[in-house]
């Protein structure tokens, strides 16, 4: 799939501080999680893509154009910043209406009502933003961004402050936008919720790319990190002892009746485990990987730098 956002050999520094270093990455329609610890360069990357900051080197392309060279791109590109960017004395409806008017939206009132329904803020629409909770403010910011129906959305920590119900609603919205063919780039520290949005991630550490792609593929590429597999059995110690001699099994741990295997060859283990269980009379009720979640993959990436 062609890239709607392309970053080529991009670096950004502020004086002697390098915020982003030689990043080359592309984003396609759908949802992509942009991950990294504090100071990794995620916000700087988003701001450069949005045209708010000039790259110190390299280039940016959004929908085939450099945003700073072609301002028309800004009608198709929005950034929802992590910091507060609202007028506290305005009502939610007025705030979104202003965004619609500035964007030149046709039939402003109809579009604003539609967006209020989309982000589930109809009941609070005529209250001042200053009285909104953090999560409600986040939804108001997202609504203001969506009112112009952009093709590319940059969302910097959009789940911050949202309660569990609001988070679920926003995650469903982002997934829906991605399914519609929009390019949605979501920066977040809430890894388990990024995993609910997408399996496509871009991970940054210390201003550099650490990994790009499908979560499962990234984990599979970490050949230096043995896979951890949980096996549920009535006799975990006996089964663990029987598996110690299997090629690729590099570790066996039994903790509170839980058998966890470390293997450098998951395919070989998958083939041998059923035979060993049958031959030894071990009942196996469940087998599942325990370190292929986004949280585990991200931890390995950060620890490996």
Image (tube, helix red, strand yellow):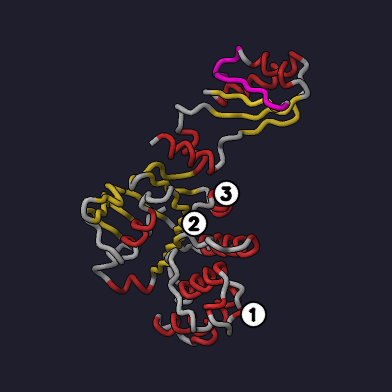
Farthest top residue in view: 245
| Highlighted magenta segment, given as a residue range | 245-256
Q: CA distance from mark 1 to mark 3?
A: 29 Å
Mark 2 and mark 3 lie on one chain; the one further toward the N terminus is 2
Q: CA distance from mark 2 to mark 1?
A: 29 Å
Q: What residue is pinned by disc 2?
A: 31
Q: Is residue 279 magenta?
A: no
Q: Position of residue 100 (x, y in %)?
A: 45, 82
Q: Quadrant of residue 131?
A: bottom right
Say whether residue 144 is left or right of residue 40.
right
Q: Which of the labelled discs sits on residue 123, or is there none?
A: 1
Q: CA distance from mark 2 to mark 3?
A: 15 Å
Q: What residue is pinned by disc 3?
A: 192
Q: Which of the labelled discs sits on residue 53, or is there none?
A: none
Callout 3 crowding tier (Cα within 10 Å): few <14, some 14–19, many ≥20? few
Taking the spot 22% from the left edge, 51% from the top edge, the residue there is 16
Which sits in the foreground, 146 or 270? 146
Taking the spot 38% from the left edge, 44% from the top edge, the residue there is 205
Q: Secondary structure at mark 3?
A: helix
């Amino acid at each position: 799939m062609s890239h709607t956002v392309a970053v080529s050999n991009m670096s950004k520094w502020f004086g002697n501080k390098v915020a982003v270093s030689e990043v080359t990455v592309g984003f396609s329609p759908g949802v992509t999680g942009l991950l990294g610890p504090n100071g990794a360069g995620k916000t700087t990357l988003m701001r450069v893509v949005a045209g708010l900051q000039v790259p110190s080197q390299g280039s940016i392309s959004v929908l085939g154009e450099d945003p700073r060279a072609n301002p028309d791109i800004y009608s198709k590109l929005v950034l929802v910043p992590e910091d507060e960017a609202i007028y506290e004395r305005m009502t939610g409806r007025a705030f979104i209406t202003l965004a619609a008017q500035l964007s030149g939206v046709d039939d402003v009132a109809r579009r604003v009502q539609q967006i209020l329904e989309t982000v589930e803020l109809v009941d609070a629409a005529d209250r001042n933003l200053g009285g909104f909770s953090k999560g409600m403010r986040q939804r108001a910011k997202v609504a203001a961004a969506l009112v112009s129906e952009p093709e590319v959305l940059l969302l910097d920590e959009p789940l911050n402050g949202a309660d569990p119900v609001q988070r679920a609603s926003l995650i469903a919205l982002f997934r829906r936008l991605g399914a519609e063919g929009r390019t949605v780039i979501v920066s977040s520290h809430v890894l388990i919720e990024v995993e609910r949005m997408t399996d496509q991630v871009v991970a940054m550490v210390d201003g550099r790319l650490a990994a790009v792609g499908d979560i499962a593929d990234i984990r599979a590429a970490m050949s230096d990190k043995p896979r951890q597999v949980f096996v549920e059995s009535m006799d975990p110690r006996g089964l663990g002892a029987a598996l110690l001699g299997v090629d690729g099994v590099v570790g066996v741990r039994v903790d509170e009746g839980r058998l966890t295997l470390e293997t450098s060859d998951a395919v070989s283990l998958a083939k041998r485990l059923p035979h060993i269980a049958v031959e030894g009379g071990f009942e196996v009720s469940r087998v599942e990987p325990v370190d292929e979640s986004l949280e585990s993959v991200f931890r390995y990436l950060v620890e490996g730098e």
